[in-house]
Image (cartoon, grey):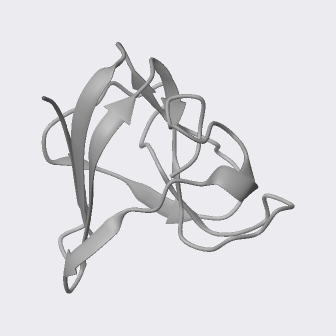
């Protein structure tokens, strides 16, 4: 994941990887800052790669929300409202993402 909400910020060299505990499921549990976040599916330092984007600009985290996978625009991101520990689960089989403040 990448964005000012993540521990590594917008740096490709400090990207925060998600765990892959089971087929089609990716998770993260840990600190996030208030700010924007999106999820690259491939590392492309020129920002041309495919990403998991929020369905709307500055989307509030929501349980079992949907997402879009594409390259380019629209560059919609989730907006994490407050710093703290968060849990994120992306289920690519069911095309859902969930965020929970811990």
The C terminus, quarter of image = top left
- Could you say where residue 30 lies in the image, as x and y percent from the top left? 29, 40
Q: Quadrant of residue 4?
A: top right
Residue beneath the point at 68% across and 71% down: 43
Specify the farthest residue to the bottom. 23
- Could you say where residue 79 lies in the image, as x and y percent from the top left? 44, 24
Work out whether 49 lies above or below 68: below
Q: Quadrant of residue 48?
A: bottom right
Specify the farthest residue to the top. 82
Instruction: Please state if 11 lies on the left or on the right of 42 as rendered.
Output: right
Instruction: Please state if 69 lies on the left or on the right of 89 as rendered.
Output: right
Instruction: Please state if 14 lies on the left or on the right of 76 as rendered.
Output: right
- Could you say where residue 59 lies in the image, as x and y percent from the top left? 40, 28
Q: Quadrant of residue 32?
A: top left
Front residue (pair 50, 2): 2
- Could you say where residue 46 lies in the image, as x and y percent from the top left? 87, 61
Residue beneath the point at 33% across and 24% down: 60
Residue beneath the point at 34% across and 33% down: 31
Instruction: Please state if 48 lies on the left or on the right of 14 as rendered.
Output: right
Residue beneath the point at 50% across and 29% down: 5
Work out whether 95 lies above or below 31: below
Counting labels gives: 0
- Is residue 92 visible in the rendered structure shown here? no
- Is residue 68 visible in the rendered structure shown here? yes
């Amino acid at each position: 994941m990448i964005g000012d909400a993540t521990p590594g910020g917008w740096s490709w060299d400090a990207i925060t990887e998600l765990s892959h505990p089971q087929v089609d499921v990716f998770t993260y549990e840990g600190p996030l800052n208030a700010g924007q976040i999106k999820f690259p599916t491939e590392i492309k330092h020129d920002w041309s790669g495919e990403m998991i984007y929020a369905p709307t600009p500055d989307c509030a985290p929501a349980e079992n929300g949907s997402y879009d996978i594409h390259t380019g625009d629209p560059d919609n991101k989730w907006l994490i409202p407050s710093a703290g520990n968060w849990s994120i689960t992306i289920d690519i089989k069911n095309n859902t993402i969930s965020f929970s403040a811990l």
